[in-house]
Image: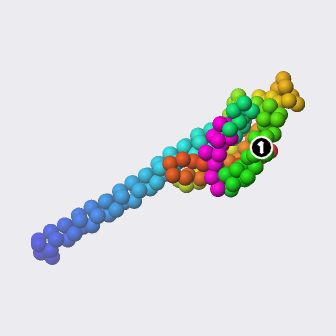
Amino acid sequence: MSRQSTARALWALTVLALVATVALAATRGRDWWDARTTEQAQSEALAAGRQHAINFATIDYRKVDEDTARVKAGATGEFLASYTSQLDDLKKVIVENKSVSSVERAEAALVSGDRDSATVIVGLIAPTSNTVVPKGETKTYRTKLGLRHVGEQWKVERLEFVG
């Protein structure tokens, strides 16, 4: 093998090693970026789910329109349709019973999630009063929220009470 052939082979191996290194770095970089953006989305979904559950449990008959508008603003899909269809009856019951509920404590955990959807479990402790219990009582709620990333916001598309 001549010196020229050896030099060409060495250059070819160097170029091949450089291309392989760049391809590996690009793949690893993309994987890191995907993991980072998914982690960020999960963190945002968890915070949003916690706040949406608080919004749902916080109600005051004196400002029922404001409270229900806040819930509706954070809703989408199935939950928005269901909540909207029952809203007039709900408002009537809240006002007639002079219901007041606030959240004293909220704990949330992410069940699963990606960049577009997430499931969050939220436990709430909510002092509540109404005409039946005027001195109030503390209620505990456990909710499971299905969230969807809509535009720049996480919104509730499913809400259910669990065990």
The answer to whether residue 86 is seen in the rendering is yes
Q: Nearer the viewer, residue 43 or 160?
A: 160
Q: Position of residue 123 (x, y in %)?
A: 72, 38
- Kindly state the secondary structure of the residue where label 1 is placed: helix
Counting from the top left corner in percent of width and height, residue 8 is at 16, 71
Give the quadrant of the C terminus.
top right
Residue 58 is situated, as x and y percent measured from the top left of the image, at 70, 34
In this image, 110 relative to 24: left or right?
Answer: right
Q: Residue at x 22, y 69 (%)?
A: 12
| Residue drawn at the location 55% of the way across and 43% of the way down | 43
Residue 139: tell me if it is visible: no
Q: Residues within 10 Å of mark 1 (few under 14, many from 20)?
A: some
Q: Main secondary structure of the magenta part?
A: helix
Q: Residue at x 39, y 59 (%)?
A: 27
**Closest to the observer, 87 or 17:** 87
Q: Is residue 52 magenta?
A: no
Q: Nearer the viewer, residue 147 or 27?
A: 147
The residue segment tinted magenta is 66-77
Quadrant where the image shows the N terminus:
bottom left
Picture quadrant where residue 98 is located: top right
Q: Residue furthest bottom?
A: 1
